[in-house]
Image (cartoon, rainbow, N blue to C red):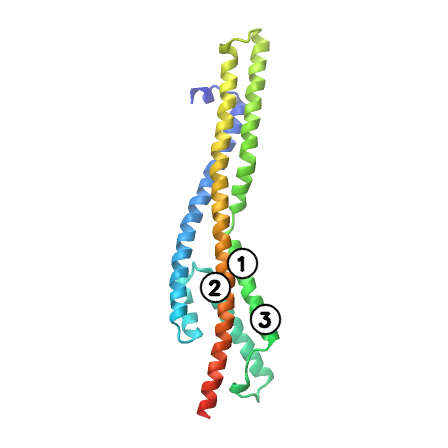
Amino acid sequence: MKMIAESDLFAKIVLLILVVFSIISWGIMINKIKLFKKVDSDTGKFRSAFRKRKRLSDVYLVCSSFKRSPLSRLMENGYNELQNVLKLEQFENPKAKVVDISLDQEQTEIIKMALEKTSSEELQKLGSKVTFLATTATVAPFLGLMGTIWGVIDSFASIGARGSASLAVVAPGIALALVATIVGLFVAIPAVIGYNHINNKLKAISTEVDNFSLDFLSSVKKELMYEKKRIRSTL
């Protein structure tokens, strides 16, 4: 610490920037870990509710209880789009019976687009600020290297000024150079690990979201088929 306190302004600025990068990076990683725990918890509860449902409307009514789960947002927006499509179908074909109403390819695509849009929005929210970790992982070693080069230059300047290459003259600059390198690596390594971990988690969530979109569309078609059969049996 004494050596850092006695270093010149440029070296202090480099080390300060590295410390700031480290604090922000750790803040992002800790927040993401907490967020993903809540996401996993709500997603597990939502999936349980989805499996136990009798109708899609039953799950739709409890979506607000699982706000952290991207699947609940998919369910909410997908179901709203489904209702809009069915209302439009009834509006355009007022004489059509309920048993005649089903989703054609174009209507299915409309619901798919709503699901894809929601999926993109949710993943973007979950992945916000993660690029800062990549920036830190890339920039920190170079900042450390810059501090190292500056320390070496300072050592040579001291040799030139004093006309001596003794250890007492060279050591402070070299030591500061090594400190800058170490600090740069200490900042970069956790950022790389955190970035890779968060990216892998986002990929897993993306796969889960895609699978649920297919489950939702499949459930919609099954429910409409079941509803038509039920109504036909009462006629």
Q: Are marks 2 and 1 in contact (CB under 8 Å)?
A: yes
> Percent x, y for residue 121?
53, 58
Residue 101 image-quadrant placement:
bottom right
Element class at badge 1: helix
Can I make out residue 177 in this image? yes
Element class at badge 3: helix
Residue under the image location 57 percent in, 10 percent down: 159
Local crowd size for mark 3, using a 10 Å CA cut-off: few (<14), some (14–19), many (≥20): some
Where 16 sits versus 234, above or below? above
Local crowd size for mark 1, using a 10 Å CA cut-off: few (<14), some (14–19), many (≥20): some
Q: Is residue 60 left or right of residue 85?
A: left
Q: CA distance from mark 3 to mark 1?
A: 17 Å
Where 106 sits versus 235, above or below? above
Where 31 sits versus 106, above or below? above
Can I make out residue 126 in this image? no
Tell me which amino acid carries mark 1. Glu
Q: Is residue 44 left or right of residue 141?
A: left
Local crowd size for mark 2, using a 10 Å CA cut-off: few (<14), some (14–19), many (≥20): many
Q: Which residue is mark 2?
A: 73
Q: Earlier in the sequence, mark 3 or mark 2?
A: 2
Q: CA distance from mark 2 to mark 1?
A: 10 Å
> Percent x, y for residue 25?
48, 40
Tell me which amino acid carries mark 3. Ile
Residue under the image location 56 percent in, 7 percent down: 162
Q: CA distance from mark 3 to mark 2?
A: 17 Å
Tell me which amino acid carries mark 2. Arg
Q: Which residue is mark 1?
A: 121
Q: Earlier in the sequence, mark 3 or mark 1?
A: 3
Q: Residue 187: which disc?
A: none
Q: Residue 110: which disc?
A: 3
